[in-house]
Amino acid sequence: MDDVVLSAPLFAGIDPEAARALLASMSRVDLPRGQVLFHEGEPGDRLYVIADGKLKLGRRSADGRENLLSILGPGEMFGELSLFDPGPRTASATAVADARLLELAHEELIAWLERYPAVAKHLLEALARRLRRTNEALADLVFSDVPGRVAKALLDLSTRFGQPVEDGLRVAHDLTQEELAQLVGASRETVNKALADFTARGWVRREGRAVVLLDMQRLERRAR
């Protein structure tokens, strides 16, 4: 578990002994599936690194509709935005699978950055990657149809959660049909229709809250 956490940008480029010292100072948080860690709009003063499990970051509109911004897994971190722009949380964080997190208070993080200023560069790079993904997601909503967005979402999830199996790559996303639709930005019916089409073509096989990608090349072409 420690090796997974130490792969986060927070620990990049620093002495391993110092990284383990910081790791030892972080507090552990166990989050059962379905439990909310924090809500959008709440004050934010913690950075989190995922040791195990999966979390979703989402926002809710005034009429109650939810949009999923991202699904995060082991080795990924979130909450660092409050360091560079203190203020209320911009999204809610909820466990979609039993999760184990490590948290670092804002004051401790500031002291850490003052001692190891090079870490700030890695945190900014992580924020830049997240912004780039957000820009890509916005472009997809404008220029891509729903099947294309579904294919791209499956491929993106596979890069982090995919496990090789005999006939393909199994992606245990742990999302309900509604959550998968929220991630793609479409109705559940439309997303299910796209998945059914992919299944009929032999590109994927559905297994509950997982999917086996059988034809990556066709999915990649459909995602463009």
Image (tube, rainbow, N blue to C red):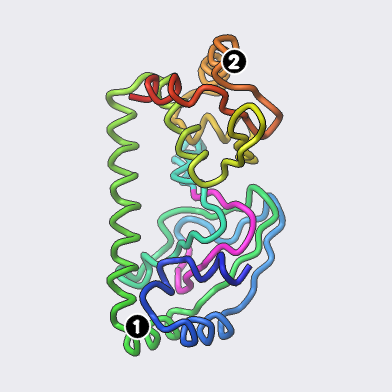
Q: In the image, 133: left or right of 57?
A: left
Local secondary structure at mark 1 = helix
- Residue 141 x %, y %: 33, 28
Number of the label disc, if any, that sits on residue 199: 2
From this view, report whether residue 167 is shown above or below residue 171.
above
Q: Residue at x 53, y 87 (%)?
A: 21
- Residue 56 x %, y %: 54, 48
Nearest to the observer: residue 3 or residue 95: 3
Q: Residue at x 47, y 34 (%)?
A: 155
Local secondary structure at mark 2 = helix
Query: Hey, what amino acid is under mark 2?
Result: Thr
Question: Looking at the image, which residue sits at the far front?
Answer: 166
Residue at mark 2 to residue at mark 1: CA–CA distance: 48 Å
Looking at the rendering, in which quadrant would you find the N terminus? bottom right
Q: Is residue 36 magenta?
A: no
Quarter of the figure with residue 50? bottom right
Query: Hey, what amino acid is under mark 1?
Result: Leu
Q: Nearer the viewer, mark 2 or mark 1?
A: 2
Q: In the image, 28: left or right of 145?
A: right
Q: Residue at x 65, y 41 (%)?
A: 174
Magenta highlight range = 42-57
Looking at the rendering, in which quadrant would you find the C terminus? top left
> Label 2: how many residues lie within 10 Å, few (<14), some (14-19) or many (20+)?
some
- Residue 129 x %, y %: 32, 53
> Label 1: how many residues lie within 10 Å, few (<14), some (14-19) or many (20+)?
some
Helix, strand or loop: magenta stretch: strand
* Disc nearer the start of the sequence (2/1): 1
Q: In the image, 197: left or right of 112?
A: right
Q: Which residue is mark 1?
A: 113
- Residue 72 x %, y %: 52, 51
